[in-house]
């Protein structure tokens, strides 16, 4: 409420009250209702940085234009309500020494009333508080420095009220848990991001311990708001009240995910290293490169040298004590090279205490000094006794193999997985007159192959290497007298358990004599074909003439005899043609007249021709395609293929009466199948069916008539058309032959 003064404000300029107000230790001033200053003591003038003449009788807003807008609204409220205005640490802007500054005061504006209760003036009390503000400013600055320090070091701060569980935290703590920096996160939310195991077994245990010791510390795994797994580390302190009860906690938190990942990787690396060391049974040691003294022996190292790591200790000169005398120079040379290269490696024999001998392999690397220590060699030692014994057995076996290979009259050669030939036996060198190095350099072996066969030789060899299929080729080799002889070369891949080629083993057998006999046979076939053609043609002509003259004769015996002669002559003509085809095939001169034609038309015409001469079987044809099928090839030769399959189907099914033929398309290939229900074949016969001169036998082991060259010719014709032929068969149930040709496309 307001104060009633017994005297007017003007009477205060003199007298006792004036002296009292002048001597007060705080600023004191009076303002009338028009905000004109009527009195101000020295301290008030000092605070305002004004003289008395500058102040008395002047309007407050003129004296302090910087703060008039701040103060006058408060004074109006004081006049209106009669309640004093208290403003602790009130900031106003004042010009001091020509500079506009923020100045802090404890202000009181109090209304004064006369005896009649009418407003008379404002009493202004002002006390500047620079020290308190400086302290608070310093605290605020220190808090800002702490905030900057913690955020720059990626450290979050927090304070937990243990009574209310209310938590106050820095912005960075929100970011650690995946929230926005301006989001406040509750203590319960923070706990919810912990893994269940770490919450129970790590954090809660650390909390219980902190209530006893005052120190709160743990590392735990969290999953942040975005589902990212992280590791955090917390350090805190518990504060207790006068009764010893915990009231609050203060602490810091850091995201240690990267460090934890490194620690986990390091542990995994150590585990993998230890696992590898155990798996390879390596012993480890360290060595001074100057004194050669060894230390830090692993248990496996001691075990290799015949010591018990649990009971025995050894000196630093263990290797010198056990090294075999024949390897002292080897070790010295390895140590000399290690000083130049930084790598130590050698193999040596050692003699154990019981007199037994072992082979060891020692490897080490010079490591640079670290943390003030000297450079040292860190190394491993491995027991390679079994390996050395195995190598000796392999070497002895290889010597024996080479001896046997060199004793063979055949040429023997070995190649790498990529086809490069690396070994030739003595017979190869003796035959060619070349030295070993000449053969293994590049394709030196190819020089002895006849020029006409070199290209095909390489093509087939590269194909075998690529497909991992056996190699076979007949070619001529030049001997040391510059004469060519025929050889049959075969090579087979040696495969590991994964199906990878480890090496190729090949032989070349002299077949020159066999080739000469074969050529003589072929010459005979050509001559016989030529000599037989004329009389057969003559016989056929006379038979046809007799049939024309006596075809309507009532002498049935004569008519049947003429038909029989004509059929046999036709078979003989086909046989002669087959013999001629074989001769042409072997010389590479089998003629092919390729063009596009209808395979459907060819199949139907061939079936009709067979039906005209063979009435013993019914031939059923099924087209399993919606349109005609065009192929590209020699129509006469493909007719020869189908004719051979049909006549064989009839011949080898004497007790059956049906042959089924189908034409269909599969994967851009036209496929024709011929199925009979005759004697069939077993697995052994199926492997040989397309070989030259092979003939199938019946149940009574009696071979069916024929030379066994028909399917051999069929196979060759299909190969020359980029086609395929195959068979499915079961003994006594029949056979089903297939052949396929690429469908003709008019590009």
Image (cartoon, rainbow, N blue to C red):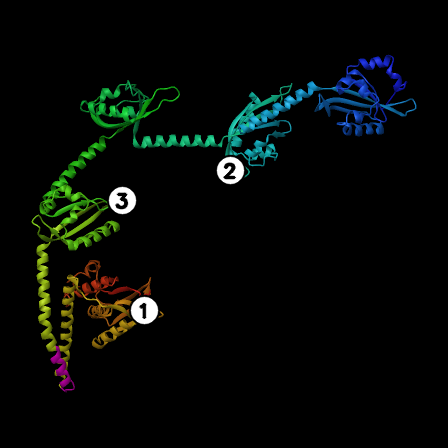
Which of the two marks, 1 or 3, is nearer to us in this view? 1
Q: Earlier in the sequence, mark 2 or mark 3?
A: 2
Relative to residue 622, is residue 149 drawn left or right?
right
Q: Residues within 10 Å of mark 3 (few under 14, many from 20)?
A: few
Q: Residue at x 12, y 46 (%)?
A: 428
Between 638 and 82, the residue placed more toward the observer is 82
Q: For numbered disc 3, what is the local secondary structure? A: loop
Q: Can residue 248 be seen?
A: no
Relative to residue 312, is residue 405 drawn left or right?
left
* x and y, in percent, of residue 436 in the image: 14, 42
**To which residue does mark 2 refer?**
228
Relative to residue 113, is residue 619 drawn left or right?
left
Label ID, residue 497: 3
**To which residue does mark 1 refer?**
629
* x and y, in percent, of residue 489 in the image: 16, 51
Q: Earlier in the sequence, mark 1 or mark 3?
A: 3
Q: Earlier in the sequence, mark 2 or mark 1?
A: 2
The answer to which quarter of the image holds residue 245 is top right
Q: For numbered disc 1, what is the local secondary structure? A: loop
Residue 705 part of the magenta segment: no
Q: Can residue 638 be seen?
A: yes
Q: Do callouts 2 and 1 mark residues in contact (Cβ within 8 Å)? A: no
Question: The C terminus lies in which quarter of the figure?
Answer: bottom left
* x and y, in percent, of residue 253 in the image: 54, 28
């Amino acid at each position: 409420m307001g104060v009633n003064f017994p005297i007017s404000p003007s009477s205060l300029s003199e007298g006792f009250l004036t002296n009292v107000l002048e001597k007060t230790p705080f600023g004191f001033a009076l303002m009338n209702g028009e905000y004109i200053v009527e009195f101000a003591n020295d301290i008030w003038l000092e605070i305002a940085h004004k003289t008395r003449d500058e102040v008395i009788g002047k309007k407050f807003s003129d004296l302090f234009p910087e703060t008039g807008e701040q103060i006058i609204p408060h004074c109006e409220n004081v006049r209106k309500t009669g309640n004093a205005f208290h403003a602790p640490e009130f900031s106003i802007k004042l010009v001091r020494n020509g500079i506009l500054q923020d100045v802090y005061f404890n202000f009181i504006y109090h209304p004064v009333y006369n005896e009649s209760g009418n407003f008379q003036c404002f009493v202004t009390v002002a006390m500047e508080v620079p020290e308190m503000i400086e302290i608070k400013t310093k605290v605020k600055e220190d808090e800002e420095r702490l905030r900057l320090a913690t955020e720059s070091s990626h450290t979050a701060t927090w304070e937990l009220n243990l009574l209310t569980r209310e938590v106050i935290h820095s912005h960075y703590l929100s970011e650690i848990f995946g929230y926005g920096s301006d989001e406040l996160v509750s203590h319960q939310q923070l706990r919810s991001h912990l893994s269940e195991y770490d919450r129970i077994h790590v954090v809660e245990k650390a909390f219980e311990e902190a209530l006893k010791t005052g120190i709160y510390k743990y590392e735990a795994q969290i999953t942040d708001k975005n589902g990212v797994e992280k590791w955090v580390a917390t350090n805190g302190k518990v504060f207790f009240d006068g009764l010893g009860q915990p009231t609050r906690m203060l602490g810091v938190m850091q995201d240690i995910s990267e460090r934890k990942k490194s620690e986990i990787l390091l542990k995994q690396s150590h585990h993998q290293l230890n696992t590898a060391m155990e798996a390879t049974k390596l012993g480890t040691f360290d060595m001074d490169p100057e004194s050669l003294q060894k230390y830090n022996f692993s248990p496996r190292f001691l075990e290799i040298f015949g010591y018990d790591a649990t009971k025995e200790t050894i000196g630093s000169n263990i290797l010198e004590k056990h090294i075999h005398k024949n390897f002292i120079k080897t070790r010295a040379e390895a140590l000399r090279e290690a000083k130049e290269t930084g790598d130590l490696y050698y193999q040596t024999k050692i003699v154990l205490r019981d007199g037994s001998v072992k082979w060891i392999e020692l490897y080490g690397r010079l490591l640079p000094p670290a943390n003030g220590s000297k450079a040292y060699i860190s190394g491993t030692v491995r027991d390679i006794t079994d390996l050395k014994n195995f190598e000796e057995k392999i070497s002895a076996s290889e010597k024996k193999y080479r001896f046997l290979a060199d004793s063979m009259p055949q040429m023997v050669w070995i190649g790498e997985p990529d086809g490069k030939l690396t070994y030739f036996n003595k017979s190869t060198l003796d035959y060619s007159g070349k030295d070993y190095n000449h053969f293994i350099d590049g394709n030196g072996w190819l020089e002895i192959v006849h020029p006409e066969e070199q290209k095909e030789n390489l093509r087939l060899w590269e194909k075998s290497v690529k497909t991992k299929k056996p190699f076979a080729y007949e070619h001529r080799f030049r001997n040391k007298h510059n004469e060519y002889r025929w050889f049959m070369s075969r090579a087979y891949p040696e495969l590991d358990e994964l199906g990878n080629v480890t090496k190729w083993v090949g032989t070349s057998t002299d077949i020159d004599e066999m080739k000469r006999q074969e050529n003589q046979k072929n010459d005979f076939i050509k001559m016989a074909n030529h000599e037989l053609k004329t009389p057969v043609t003559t016989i056929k002509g006379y038979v046809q003439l007799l049939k024309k003259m006596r075809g309507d004769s009532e002498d049935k015996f004569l008519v049947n005899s003429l038909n029989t002669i004509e059929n046999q002559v036709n078979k003989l003509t086909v046989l002669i043609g087959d013999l001629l085809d074989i001769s042409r095939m072997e010389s590479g001169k089998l003629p092919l007249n390729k063009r596009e034609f209808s395979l459907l038309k060819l199949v139907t015409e061939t079936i009709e021709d067979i039906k005209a001469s063979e009435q013993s079987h019914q031939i059923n044809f099924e087209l399993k395609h919606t349109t005609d099928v065009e192929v590209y090839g020699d129509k006469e030769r493909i007719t020869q293929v189908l004719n051979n399959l049909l006549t064989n189907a009839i011949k080898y099914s004497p007790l059956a009466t049906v042959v089924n033929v189908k034409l269909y398309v599969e994967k851009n290939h036209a496929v024709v199948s011929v199925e009979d229900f005759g004697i069939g074949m077993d697995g052994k016969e199926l492997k040989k069916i397309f070989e030259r001169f092979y003939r199938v036998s019946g149940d009574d082991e009696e071979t069916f008539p024929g030379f066994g060259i028909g399917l051999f010719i069929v196979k060759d014709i299909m190969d020359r058309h980029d086609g395929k032929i195959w068979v499915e068969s079961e003994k006594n149930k029949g056979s089903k032959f297939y052949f396929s040709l690429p469908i003709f496309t008019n590009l």
